[in-house]
Each structure stands twice: as C-alpha cells, then as structure tokens.
Amino acid sequence: MRNTLIAALTCVSLTAFAAPPASTPALLAKGKASYGTNCVPCHGEQGHGDGPAAVALNPKPRDYTKDTLKNGDKVEDIFKTLTEGLKGTTMVSFAHLPEEERWALAYHVTELRKAGGAGTAAAVPDAGTAPAKKTGKAKK
Ligand code: HEC
C-alpha cells in the first residue's frame, strides 16, 4: 500500500514537470522577445533556418516551420530540446534560461510552425490548400 502510494506520487511529480504552463499572450510575447535575442541568429526570424549565422553551421538548422523535428514538436518536446540541447549540433542547451522562458520559447516555436503550416500541409499533401512554393516573402 505504501509503495503504491509512493509510486503514484512519483508519477504525479514527473507529470507535473513535463506539463507546460498555459499559453497566455504574456507568455507568448516573452517567447517572441527571447527568440529574437537567442535564436534568430541561427534559426531566422520566421524559423526557416536562415539566420545570419546559419551559413557557417554544419549541420544547418532545419526549417522548423515545415521540417520534422527529431525530438518531436509538442511544446513539451521542444522544451526538452531547449533544456538538453541536441547532441552533435550547435544547438546547445538553454538550461541557463529560466524555466518559464524556455516554455515561452517552446510556445513561440510551435507558433512559428503553425504559421508555416507544419503538421497540416505534411499530413495532407496536395490538399490544394497549402501553397506548394514559398511565396515572395522578403528575403534579405
Ligand atoms: C548557434 C546556432 C543556434 C542557436 C543560437 C539556436 N539553435 Fe536551435 N538548432 C541549431 C541547429 C544547428 C539545430 C540542429 C539542426 C536542426 O535540426 O535544426 C537546431 C535545432 C533546433 C530545434 C529542432 C530540434 C529537433 O527536435 O529537431 C529546435 C526546436 C530549436 N533548435 C530551437 C531553438 C531555439 C528556441 C533557440 C533559441 C533559444 C535556438 N534553437 C537557438 C542551431 C541553433
């Protein structure tokens, strides 16, 4: 009985750690601002992997508005990537940032993915809704 209780409690606390906070406008704004400082140099403003520093990288940051993410693309998956980094790439751990900021960043990445149509276009190819080519977005 006691062990069951302990096991149950352990479960609860593990889940609590992995549970993202509610996405609020304030949190999203924070994520966007932090992304601008910490991520744009490599990932680019819209997450296409075309930041000014990306040219020099190997492997290059993928376009996370449409490419599959290795660690998964749920907010908690991206949080994990931010906390641990990706081995063998220049994607380092951002564990030095406060936990709330990492959640905010994770939300911002999912927003960029949505804006880029990730998940919908890939799941339904040729649905006739998603534009096949990149439209003439300003390229610097
Ligand atoms: C020094 C360049 C650099 C910086 C700065 C950087 N990244 Fe990355 N990032 C990479 C590279 C390289 C990869 C690995 C290639 C890839 O899969 O995109 C990557 C991968 C990722 C992935 C995909 C992980 C997966 O599961 O495939 C996410 C999400 C991500 N970065 C988010 C961020 C966020 C958010 C920030 C800012 C806090 C950030 N990165 C800062 C270079 C960078």
Image (cartoon, grey):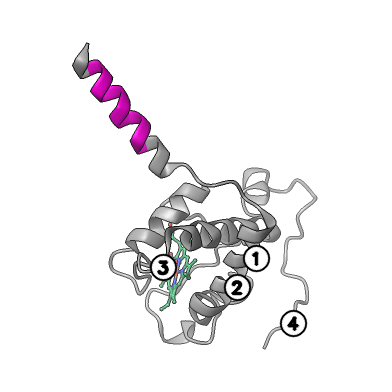
Residue drawn at x 74%, y 82% is 138
The answer to whether mark 3 is within 8 Å of ligand 1 is yes
Q: Name the residue that disc number 2 marks.
A: 33
Residue designated by label 4: 138
Gap in angstroms between the C-alphas marked 1 and 3: 16 Å
Provide the residue designation for mark 1: 29
- Whether pointer 4 and pointer 1 mark residues with C-beta atoms closer than 8 Å, the reply is no
Q: Nearer the viewer, mark 2 or mark 4?
A: 2
Label pair 3/4, CB-CB below 8 angstroms? no
Circle nearer the N terminus (2, 4): 2
| Nearer to the camera, 84 or 113 | 84
Three-letter amino acid code of the residue under disc 2: Ala
Q: Is residue 34 visible?
A: yes
> Does dot 1 land on a helix, a strand or a loop?
helix
Q: Quadrant of ligand 1?
A: bottom left
* Secondary element at tag 4: loop
- Give the residue displayed 24% in from the left and 16% down from the top: 4
Ligand 1 has an atom within 8 Å of the beta carbon of the residue at disc 4:
no
Q: How far apart are marks 3 and 4 (CA)?
A: 31 Å
**Type of residue at label 1?**
Ala
The image shows residue 117 at horizontal and vertical percentages of 68, 55
Magenta stretch containing residue 120, yes or no? Answer: no
Q: Does the magenta stretch include residue 9?
A: yes
Looking at the picture, how far across and down is residue 43, in whole percent? 52, 74
Residue type highlighted by circle 4: Ala
Q: Give the range drawn in magenta.
A: 4-14
Q: Specify which label sits upstream in the sequence, 3 or 2.
A: 2
Q: Are marks 1 and 2 in contact (CB under 8 Å)?
A: yes
Specify the quadrant that holds the C terminus.
Answer: bottom right
Above or below: residue 53 compared with residue 12: below
Q: Dot 1: few (<14), some (14–19), or many (≥20) neighbours within 10 Å?
A: some
Tell me the distance, in whole angstroms, between the alpha carbons under discs 1 and 2. 6 Å
